[in-house]
């Protein structure tokens, strides 16, 4: 069925046309576990094996029976879902439950304070706002400290207790001044003020790895590396400096390149000297421990250590974005704990809602938390009763039986990975790489822009090969998976923990078939509807 814009209605008509062009514009009528159901011409249900997994939001699968039953009970109970500005027992319990999991996983009891939101990008926005709120308070404190020093030293000079050091003006290119200490200190203070003023209002910067994806809202999209998503809106928000994931040393170099100093006055041995004070340019380093939208790139332990070391040196918080990699998807609650990366902030979303609610959270460690932030940030639907209780149920299921579900994810991920590696070994000319951890895996197809088949060549050169492969797998094998806008040749696999051997086998047959068609350059079969 090839829908046109008028038939698809007004919701993203162009995207609908793209999906239609590669046969992905299917309407689903029911979903359970790893299966979506569509209707055929005779209105009969046809199962589709779903590896898109809600872009990582379905670690428990579509409509998990315990989650659905729990949600139904909540609605039947007529619980207050929107009772803003009242005690929020459910949200507090959820924050406490998240802290228990973090304490278990991180091995210490430092508390994390929760700022709840409704979507992943909104949690990132909250984290970014809090980090900037924190940075501005640091800037204000530094500025006040310098002003206090200046005022105290002005008095000391006027009282004849200290004098400006010989050469105090050197950094401004001048020789010594009049010799009158009172006049000299006023000139020095004026020069320090003129140096500091523009720097105090310098816009903050962020750090993020190349390939980063943190959402598409105003602030978060500037942390997303994909230029198509980011650059049209760069005038709206603080910019990020992106560092290559395979160059940990680039982090320190990037920080040094942006180093900004304020000037301060100090007294040494009775004389006044000018000293430098580092200005906090960087607001936060934001990174995913496993990049999703960027094409399933696993951050190395070496890179994680370089991030932590560089950020500690400049007192810059590390925001670990676990929106896609978290909630058990890697085989641990946090994928970052597998690479020894400790976050100052964490963001969680997607599977936190159990596949039936929309909720997200930014968690901020107590040592960095600014409680005044609560007075300036809020959201109508955040921490609502329904989402909070569903999220509590999700954590209960993840943590049950001493974390049995994480071990299931790890074992299912190993089985899926083993199959993918075997298919790649059989078709190295078609499959370039298999990457990821747990049940967050990616299969990268070889570039086909040199194909002798014009259609395959054209699709590859236009960045649609991955979508065309996805269309073939859906039409020919009833298997659903997608590439992403930032890694068009990498199909991502994010099934639920309920993945069965039969589902792995079905995917194996589908992948081997599409690899054979591409090896044969059989564009007729490849594009058959
Ligand atoms: C690490 C991370 N941080 C913040 C976000 C933003 O969350 P929201 O989408 O809930 O605002 C995401 C959400 N991910 C969205 C996503 C992830 C992905 O891997 C693919 C696609 C996608 C979307 C459309 C078409 C193809 N791919 N979308 C994320 O993965």
Image (cartoon, rainbow, N blue to C red):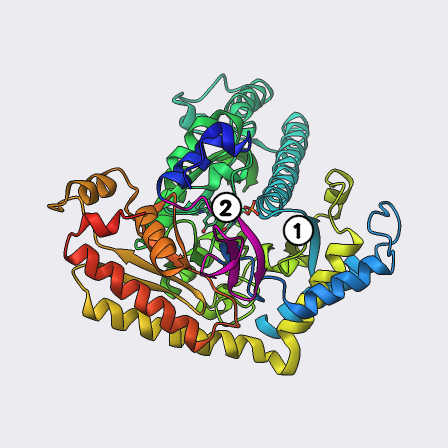
User: Image point 21% across, 70% down: which residue?
Assistant: 425
Q: Residue at x 44, y 22 (%)?
A: 176
Q: Earlier in the sequence, mark 2 or mark 1?
A: 2
Q: In this orientation, does residue 99 appear? A: no
Q: Give the x, y percent position of residue 60.
A: 58, 67
Inter-mark Cα distance, 2 to 1: 17 Å
Q: Position of residue 307 (x, y in %)?
A: 43, 55
Residues 300 and 414: in front is 414
Asked if residue 99 is among those painted magenta in the image, a careful observer would answer no
For mark 1, what is the residue? 358
Q: Is residue 32 magenta?
A: yes
Q: Nearer the viewer, mark 2 or mark 1?
A: 1
Q: List the residue tagged with mark 2.
A: 214
The numbered mark at residue 273 is none
- Horizontal relation, residue 150 to residue 80: left or right: left
> In the depicted view, which residue is nearer to us: 354 or 28?
28
Ligand 1: does it lie within 8 Å of the C-beta at label 2? Answer: yes
Point 46% across, 56% down: residue: 52
Residue 515 falls left or right of residue 92: left
| Residue 527 seen in the current view | yes
Q: Name the spot of residue 352 as percent of width and height, x first.
A: 63, 59
- Is the N terminus in the top left, top right, bottom left or bottom right quadrant? top left
Query: Secondary structure under badge 2?
Result: loop
Span of residues in magenta: 23-52
Mark 1 is surrounded, within 10 Å at the Cα level, by few (under 14), some (14 to 19) or many (20 or more) other residues, namely many
In the picture shown, does residue 295 fall above or below 158? Answer: below
Dividing the picture into quarters, in which one does residue 14 lie? top left
Residue 381's x, y, as percent? 75, 44
User: Which type of secondary structure does the marked residue at label 1 adopt?
Assistant: loop
């Amino acid at each position: 069925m090839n829908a046109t814009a008028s038939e698809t209605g007004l919701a993203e008509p162009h995207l609908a046309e793209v999906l239609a062009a590669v046969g992905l514009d299917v309407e689903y009528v029911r979903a359970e576990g790893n299966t979506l159901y569509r209707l055929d011409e005779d209105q009969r249900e046809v199962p589709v094996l779903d590896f898109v997994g809600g872009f990582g939001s379905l670690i428990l699968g579509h409509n998990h029976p315990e989650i659905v039953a729990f949600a139904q009970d909540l609605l039947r109970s007529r619980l207050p879902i929107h009772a803003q500005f009242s005690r929020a027992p459910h949200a507090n319990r959820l924050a406490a439950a998240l802290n228990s999991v973090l304490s278990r996983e991180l091995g210490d009891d430092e508390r994390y304070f929760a700022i709840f939101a409704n979507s992943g990008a909104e949690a990132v926005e909250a984290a970014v706002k809090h980090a900037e709120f924190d940075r501005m308070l640091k800037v204000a404190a530094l500025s006040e400290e310098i002003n206090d020093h200046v005022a105290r030293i002005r008095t000391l000079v006027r009282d004849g207790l200290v004098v400006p050091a010989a050469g105090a003006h050197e950094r401004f290119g001048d020789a010594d001044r009049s010799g009158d200490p009172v006049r000299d200190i006023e000139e020095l203070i004026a020069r320090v003020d003129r140096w500091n003023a523009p720097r105090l209002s310098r816009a903050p910067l962020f750090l993020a790895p190349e390939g980063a994806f943190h959402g598409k809202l105003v602030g978060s999209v500037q942390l997303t590396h994909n230029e198509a998503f980011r650059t049209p809106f760069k005038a709206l928000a603080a910019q990020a400096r992106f560092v290559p994931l395979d160059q940990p040393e680039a982090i320190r170099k990037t920080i040094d390149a942006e180093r900004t100093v304020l000037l301060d006055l100090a007294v040494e041995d009775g004389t006044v000297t000018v000293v430098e004070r580092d200005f906090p340019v960087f607001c936060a380093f934001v990174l995913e421990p496993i990049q999703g939208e960027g094409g399933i790139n696993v951050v190395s332990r070496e890179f994680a250590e370089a991030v932590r070391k560089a950020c500690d040196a400049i007192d810059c918080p590390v925001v670990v974005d676990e929106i896609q990699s978290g909630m058990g998807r890697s085989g641990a609650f946090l994928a970052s704990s597998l690479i020894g990366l400790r976050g100052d902030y964490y963001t969680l979303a997607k599977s936190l809602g159990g596949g039936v609610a929309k909720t997200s959270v930014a968690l901020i460690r107590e040592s960095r938390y600014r409680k005044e932030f609560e007075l300036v940030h809020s959201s109508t639907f955040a921490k609502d009763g329904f989402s909070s209780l569903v999220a509590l149920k999700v954590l209960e299921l993840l943590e049950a039986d001493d974390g049995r579900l994480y071990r299931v994810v790890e074992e299912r991920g190993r089985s899926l990975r083993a199959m993918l590696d075997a298919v790649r070994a059989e078709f190295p000319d078609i499959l370039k790489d298999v990457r990821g951890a747990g049940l967050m895996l990616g299969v990268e197809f070889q570039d086909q822009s040199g194909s002798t088949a014009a259609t395959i060549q054209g699709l590859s050169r236009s960045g649609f090969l991955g979508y065309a492969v996805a269309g073939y797998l859906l039409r020919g094998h009833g298997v659903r998976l997608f590439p992403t806008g930032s890694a068009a040749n990498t199909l991502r696999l994010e099934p639920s923990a309920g993945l069965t051997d039969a589902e792995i086998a079905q995917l194996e047959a589908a992948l081997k078939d599409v690899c054979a068609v591409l090896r044969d350059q059989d564009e007729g079969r490849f594009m058959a509807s």
